[in-house]
Amino acid sequence: MGRVGIVGIGQTQFRSKREDVNSVELVNEAVRAALADAQLTIKDIDAIIIGNMEHFESINYSEMWTIDGSGGYMKPVMKITTGGTTGSTIACAGFYQVSSGMFDRVLVIGWEHLSESDTTGAIASCSDPIWERSVMAGAVGPLAIVASEYMRIHGTTEEDAARVAVQAHKNALNNPYAHLHLDITVDDVLNSAMLSYPMKLLDMCPTSDGACAMVFAEDKSAREITDNVAWVKSVATRHDTAFFGDGGLKHGDKLRSLYLATEEAYTRAGIKNPFKELDVIEMYEPSSWSALTWVDSLHICEPGEAPKLFEEGVLSMKGELPLNPSGGVISTNPIGATGAVRVAEAALQIRGMADRRQVPDVELAMATGFGGSGWSDVMILER
Amino acid sequence: MSDEYVTLSTKLAMPYRYVAGVIGSKFFTELRDNKKILARRCPECKRVIMPPREYCPKCFSVKTDEWVELSGEGSIESFTIIRYTEPKIQPVEPPYAVGVIKLDGTDGGLTHIIGDVDLDKIEVGMRVKAVFSDERRGNILDIGYFKPI
Ligand SMILES: [Zn+2]
């Protein structure tokens, strides 16, 4: 199998309401940006993968709706809908399709126009309707349960989590695409409204409108397009069980699927000491508390050490292993695009194109996606 | 270019009728008619699965073949207190507690409401028991909530 690389990246502006564009125009904004970055036209694209959580817009068949924006006319188009992982799964699928040898250049697009419908209602409909929907409504409750379990196991404080949110928002100030640009303090987070103990408003991600597109290309084609390629080094995916009661999400000590997926991705990439070898991580963290639990799942520290890594600045922009220079999901969450943004931001870091949020000399970057009852995608990129 | 962005506001009311399945139907009829809470044993790993399922998610080999009747008592494994309001989808008015209840004799947790309790006094490991609703309709809220014992 030849190498596969990312040669084009396009993001839209992420905002709470993108009423200036409809969904087709929103998708097109990201597609045009990715094609422009790769200096390609839609004629150069062999296949298209589009991802979104369509019930979040109360639509269906979104790959058909958006075809005038995606450029899929008379091309092979495939839609992917895997919850929060949608955006990272389209990246994995782009890699799979190019590696198969079937296509040379594949355009992947993740998008969400969340403001068009009721996100919490839509998330509630993700739960099993017979067993869990009526008692586990929305995303905050389950994430809050994980948070309280992490607190109990490790003695973590609300200040520890608040620090994570402050770091994410501080990083987002360097990212012109980010939805929220909040200059906030630990006290601001601690004083924000309690949603579901210990989760407060500023611990949680927002809901955003926006899209992200990337062009994946096979070795020779990629090198013809540009000499600045973010090469895919490895990918891994793990899915946990469906019910929250016995699923991996419940376990506050770590996210089981992420723990196993990163382990596999490191092995495939020949990475022995991820903390030393990785230069930057773009991790899917829908809340500050999730970031704590899930940093513990990346094999970069001992269980329970994540709060210390944040407190000592190890994961900050100036630290040894910067986490989410983009501001992460805590600052921007257009669900079907969120995982794609992680991969795109990691690729920008590899290509040295991240402007004010650039980490110096990035050789190896990792992106993760999260969804469902604790599902995880991992993609490792190299220069 | 117009400087006004036109939007259309509407509402989609979708009726649903979800099927509980072979295993779920037995569980919910026993719950409704006899206030019994049943789980299913995996013949391979011997785990008692809650909610009961036809196949063990871990072994995925032979069908589960044995009903196990539970006492309805268990312990709180983890919990949170919901303070935000989503009237259309929440089972009761906030603030209220939800958690994962590890029922005695099972290997999985059941997510449910923790009620009839001082919200500030809930703890992990606290013993609880099922309180059945007076009017039972054959769904998970036939268990109204779990209360401390
Ligand atoms: Zn089994």
Image (spheres, coloured by chain):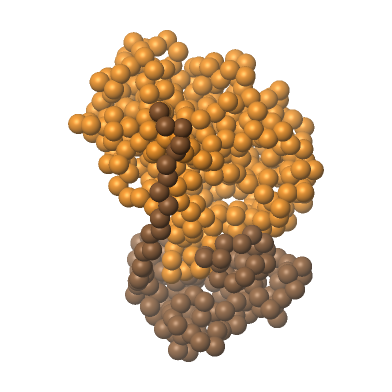
Chain colours: A orange, B brown
Is residue A244 depicted above or below A162 in this figure? Answer: below
Q: Which residue is at a point 71% across and 25% down the rendered structure image?
A: A319
Is residue B147 depicted above or below A348 in this figure? Answer: below
Nearer to us in this view, A154 or A8: A8
Q: Which residue is at a point 39% across and 38% down the rendered structure image?
A: A22
Q: Which residue is at a point 48% across and 85% down the rendered structure image?
A: B136
Nearer to us in this view, B74 or A360: A360
Is residue B121 depicted above or below A148 in this figure? Answer: below
Is residue A6 depicted above or below A88 in this figure? Answer: above
Q: Position of residue A281 (x, y in %)?
A: 58, 30
Instruction: Give the quadrant of residue A169.
Output: top right
Nearer to us in this view, B78 or B49: B78
Total marks drawn?
Answer: 0
Q: Position of residue A78 (x, y in %)?
A: 29, 39
Q: Position of residue A251 (x, y in %)?
A: 60, 55
On the rendered structure, is A371 left or right of A331?
Answer: left
Residue A376 visible in the shown view: no
On the rendered structure, is A241 left or right of B94?
Answer: left
Q: Position of residue A118 (x, y in %)?
A: 48, 54
Q: Quadrant of the N terminus of chain A?
A: top left
Q: Which residue is at a point 37% across and 30% down the rendered structure image?
A: A28
Instruction: Give the quadrant of residue A100.
Output: top left
Residue A174 visible in the shown view: yes
Instruction: Give the quadrant of residue A292.
Output: top right
